[in-house]
Amino acid sequence: MPTDDIRWIDDRGRDNDYNPPELNPRGIIMEAKCPHSATTVNCNDCRMSALCLPMALQADEIDRLNRIVERGRPLQRNEYIYHAGEPFKSIYAVRSGAVKGFTVNDEGVEQVTGFYLPGEIFGMDGIGHPNHINSAVALETAAICEIPFSRLEELSTQIPSLQRHFFRLMSREITNDQQLITMLSKNSAEERIATLLTSISARNARRKLSGSRFRLPMSRADIGNYMGLTVETVSRVFSRFQKQDILSVDKKEIEILDLDRLRSMANT
Amino acid sequence: MPTDDIRWIDDRGRDNDYNPPELNPRGIIMEAKCPHSATTVNCNDCRMSALCLPMALQADEIDRLNRIVERGRPLQRNEYIYHAGEPFKSIYAVRSGAVKGFTVNDEGVEQVTGFYLPGEIFGMDGIGHPNHINSAVALETAAICEIPFSRLEELSTQIPSLQRHFFRLMSREITNDQQLITMLSKNSAEERIATLLTSISARNARRKLSGSRFRLPMSRADIGNYMGLTVETVSRVFSRFQKQDILSVDKKEIEILDLDRLRSMANT
DNA sequence: CGTCAGTTTGAGCGAGCTCAACGTGAGTGG
DNA sequence: CCACTCACGTTGAGCTCGCTCAAACTGACG
């Protein structure tokens, strides 16, 4: 089993020409290149097409997919994409920003089930059920593509490679979850954090962003929740990694100084 | 979210007429009713048809499914159904006995990913990959139906309800795994064991077997591995439950004396 | 300037782990 | 038939990692 095909590493990617959004001196995202723009984008010219559903498709098929995709306005931090209990209608793709998936149990305790970065698909939890099981919120300003599931299902029966790709996505979700299960039952706090960081690093690299310097879109609390740790433990592990010159941490800005060491801790 | 739709409780079930195998005085399973018999069974008269893939199908469709199902000889304890790394060709259904699914990581450490009882489908981990990610072994003498995936995929494009049912199965696998993840990151040893026992109880009840008296097909080590606990902790929890008159334990024979209490511990 | 959410750091505790010894029953070979 | 082995399970003693509780810090925002 390839060890780097773990939960958060989706090797759907091929090369693409994604570049970080350009900022003007005041840090405001410029209109023309805004990665959250809703109206100008379709699947054909989307920067994520090589990572997303279109990667399985031919030009004319992408066009058919494109016609069923709905693109809403950009979402702000903490806006919901869907709530648990809502009727399940669609699955979603992240075009920009970051999304957190989570469940809330009867006692109101939250469990983070995944973080989704650009080019990744989420919302598949609802497929087997009338309503969504999970909820999903934007962790930061985000552009999301909505793909009505019934129409995708229909299209799948017509485009076998889409059906196959979709089976593959769901299966990958299963094996990913199982690898998280392994981690939660066997790995130490340091191993868990190391695994999360190498994962995010690899996913960024796949989007042609830096794999060694990036901004974590989620809070320490979310990380801890996801990895089965308390906030305090997450914070302590970050501090320890910094003392050991593995990381340089400044709030959410992370620089990986020793990726090899991080990888070898993550490897289990 | 319905709290009893958890990992191991597959509510695929409708009523069926399953009864325990009849034993002659020496405990040898009688030929005519042997639940492991390979040759005499097809999907139409299989006792598990109401729990298994056929539940989504009409009579003529079951017939078409039946024609692609392969039934081998019964497997003995510890025999593999498939090994990790083998080419992925089929998914499987348990007709009788019990199966353990697990991964082995680079260091040779095993992680149990699931237990499968009669009427349940396994092997879906391989779908997105050329080779199997997990391995699967029989925990006791077991009869297994093999369903070649490429033919099932083909049949799915022709029978929409089968495609939908199959999506549903995979999605359920995802939400089930996510509930296990929640348990592993938040629940105590007692809560975990309570959850496992109520699950097996419910699954037995669905097969019209006793939900209060049953034999665990797996070892303490397997339970511990699956639940992220050591053997010693599992054993101690069983002892504690027995002292509290929640269970009566005799090796693998379990009698649940206070299902309500067990359920309330499992509820999280 | 105060407030508030998020983060960091310290001190102490406890659930579950490790290590070790012993018990039990099924299988095997003499 | 017994003696032996071996896998599996139980129980005890002590330790440790991560949790809990508490306090203080930081930066964003009104």
Image (cartoon, coloured by chain):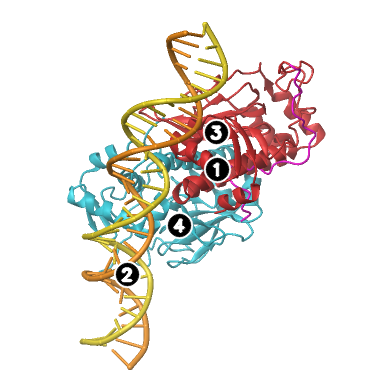
Chain colours: A red, B cyan, C orange, D yellow
**Are the residues under marks 1 and 2 on the same chain?**
no
Which residues fall within the magenta stretch? A1-25
Q: Kindly identify which numbered label has been placed on residue B28.
A: 2
The type of residue carrying mark 4 is: Lys
Q: Nearer the viewer, residue B166 or A6?
A: A6
Label 2 or label 4, whichever lies nearer to me, is: 4
- Looking at marks 3 and 1 on the same chain, the residue that comes earlier in the sequence is marked by 3
The type of residue carrying mark 3 is: Ile
Label 3 or label 2, whichever lies nearer to me, is: 3
Q: Secondary structure at mark 4?
A: strand
* Disc 3 target residue: A127
* Disc 4 target residue: B100
Q: Position of residue B221 (x, y in %)?
A: 38, 59
Is residue A190 covered in magenta? Answer: no
Q: Which quarter of the picture shows residue B133? A: bottom right
* Disc 1 target residue: A243
Chain letter of the residue carrying label 3: A
Chain letter of the residue carrying label 2: B
Q: Nearer the viewer, residue B106 or B1?
A: B106
Q: Which quarter of the picture shows residue A257? A: top right
What whole-number distance in Å separates the C-alpha atoms at marks 3 and 1? 45 Å
Image quadrant where one finds the C terminus of chain A: bottom right
Q: Residues within 10 Å of mark 1 (few under 14, many from 20)?
A: few
Q: Position of residue D16 (x, y in %)?
A: 39, 52
Q: Secondary structure at mark 1?
A: helix
Q: Position of residue C27 (x, y in %)?
A: 35, 77
Q: Residues within 10 Å of mark 2 (few under 14, many from 20)?
A: few
**Are the residues under marks 3 and 2 on the same chain?**
no
What whole-number distance in Å separates the C-alpha atoms at marks 1 and 2? 65 Å
